[in-house]
Image (cartoon, rainbow, N blue to C red):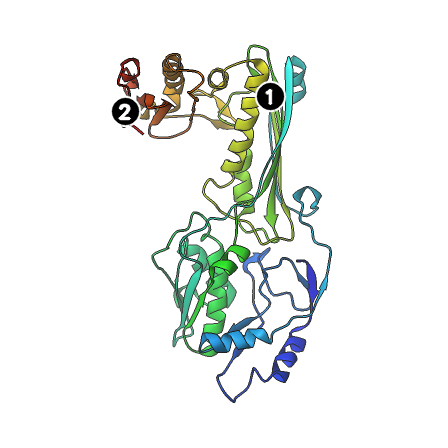
């Protein structure tokens, strides 16, 4: 939804005519002056202005019980004039964050390439689907402060938002993180908004306020993983060496910025994958659309970039007629390599990670030769992990290689008659 709205006075008058707000019967508390928890880019009530997405809050209503609250909400009917929404990130014109990484000369790299492959890779919204929905209890204090109990991941985010939004001293705000009930990034920035809403009502009502989203509202309104459109143009030599990477990353921020600059920075830095290439250009931008804001989710932008670059590597390997694991081995970063433009890969070899990755790949390729090619699939993981553990499975057979500080250990059981039974 993208629309212009009525003024506060018009909505208030409409509610008065329905006798929802008054002295007779249960008191309904209606509050319009919502404020921005995260600076000028944060969500706010558009008084006679524009509604930026379908789940944007227009008013806060509190009541002693759910039936009374439901009756009040039935009579709240904002008048909106539809405006054309922007839902396609590629058509969005408002850029909320952007980065560029340059290394070497991509034109020189492509001139040396013997094969150039292009591809565009897309990912959509993804819901964190934590078990417990967004929930907050705000308790007003006698000294003018507020105590908030909530299902959240980042209590100091919420504390900073309340201090700024309510205009109170830091020692007048107390945030209690209850057992979170799942988060996965989905309860990083959005709880600040819920805490402000509950706190505004609690201070006006002079009593505790509980605000809990039901599952439908939670899914409809809260932040999701950023949808992405990532374009790769990659140059390689016929022997499978990367010589040029030209990458464009577009993330859909939704209606407001939230954590998009941080998520985009991770997506940008990792968009070339864990692979060495002398000539790299990466351009990225986060753009605003008329959907609910997008934010943190496990992986923080790297997930989208990994999907794109690894899909692209598979296509390149296929075009070159190389095994996809072998193709990755030839291009894998090593200790001392420059990742992006300025980041030097420094891995403690005592933890046996990147420094031993090539040995792990070699061991797995050797094991793979004993597997039926029609039944076995190759898996490959490379990263800053305490250990690498790879498994190859064919029917009940499991071949594995384990990497630690002592080196690589492989499975000999694969060559026996009763291999891997009962191993998952």
Cα gap from disc 1 to disc 2, whole angstroms: 47 Å
Q: Position of residue 365 (x, y in %)?
A: 40, 15
In this orientation, does residue 167 appear? Answer: no
Marker disc for residue 279 = 1
Q: Name the residue beneath numbered marker 2.
A: 421
Element marked by disc 1: loop
Of residues 52 and 260, which is closer to you in this image?
A: 52
Q: Relative to 30, does residue 89 appear above or below in the rendering?
A: above
Which quadrant of the figure contains the N terminus? Answer: bottom right
Q: Where is residue 147 in the image (x, y as percent from the top left)?
A: 39, 67
Marker disc for residue 120 = none
Q: Position of residue 153 (x, y in %)?
A: 40, 53
Residue 68 falls left or right of residue 315: left
Give the residue displayed 63% in from the left and 57% down from the top: 53
Give the residue displayed 49% in from the left and 71% down from the top: 200
Residue 298 falls left or right of residue 78: left
Residue 160 falls left or right of residue 251: left
In this orientation, does residue 17 appear? Answer: yes
Q: Earlier in the sequence, mark 1 or mark 2?
A: 1
Give the residue displayed 69% in from the left and 68% down from the top: 48
Element marked by disc 2: loop
């Amino acid at each position: 939804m993208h629309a212009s709205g009525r003024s506060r006075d018009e909505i208030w008058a409409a509610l008065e005519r329905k006798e929802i707000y008054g002295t007779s019967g249960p008191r309904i508390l209606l509050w319009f002056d919502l404020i921005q928890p995260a600076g000028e880019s944060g969500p706010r009530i558009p008084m006679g202005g524009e509604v930026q997405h379908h789940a944007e809050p227009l008013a806060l209503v509190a009541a002693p019980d759910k039936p009374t609250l439901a009756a009040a909400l039935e009579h709240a009917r904002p008048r909106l004039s539809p405006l054309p929404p922007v839902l396609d990130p590629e058509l969005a014109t408002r850029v909320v964050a952007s980065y560029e990484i340059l290394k070497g000369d991509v034109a020189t790299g492509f001139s040396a390439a013997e094969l150039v492959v292009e591809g565009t890779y897309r990912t959509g919204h993804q819901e964190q689907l934590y078990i417990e929905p967004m929930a907050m209890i705000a308790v007003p204090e006698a000294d003018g402060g507020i105590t908030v109990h909530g299902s959240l991941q980042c209590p100091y985010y919420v504390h900073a938002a309340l201090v700024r939004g309510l205009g109170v001293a830091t020692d007048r705000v107390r945030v209690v993180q209850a057992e979170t009930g799942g988060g996965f990034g989905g309860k990083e920035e959005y709880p600040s908004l819920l805490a402000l809403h509950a706190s505004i009502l609690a201070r006006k009502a002079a009593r505790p306020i509980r605000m809990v989203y039901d599952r439908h509202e939670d899914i409809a309104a809260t932040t999701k993983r950023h949808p992405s459109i990532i374009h790769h143009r990659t140059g390689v030599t016929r022997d499978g060496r990367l010589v040029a990477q030209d990458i464009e990353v577009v993330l859909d921020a939704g209606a407001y910025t939230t954590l998009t600059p941080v998520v985009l920075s991770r997506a940008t830095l990792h968009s070339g994958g864990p692979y060495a290439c002398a000539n790299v250009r990466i351009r990225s931008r986060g753009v605003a659309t008329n959907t609910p804001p997008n934010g943190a989710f496990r992986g923080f932008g790297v997930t989208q970039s990994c999907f794109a670059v690894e899909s692209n590597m598979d296509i390149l390997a296929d075009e070159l007629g190389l095994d996809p694991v072998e193709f990755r081995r030839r291009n894998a970063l090593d200790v001392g390599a420059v990742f992006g433009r300025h980041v030097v890969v420094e891995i403690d070899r005592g933890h046996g990670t990147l420094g031993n990755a090539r040995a792990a790949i070699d061991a797995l390729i050797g094991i793979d030769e004993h597997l039926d090619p029609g039944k076995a699939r190759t898996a490959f993981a490379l990263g800053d992990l305490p250990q690498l553990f790879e498994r190859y499975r064919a029917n009940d057979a499991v071949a594995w290689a384990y990497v630690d500080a002592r080196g690589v250990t492989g499975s000999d059981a694969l060559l026996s008659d009763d291999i891997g039974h009962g191993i998952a």
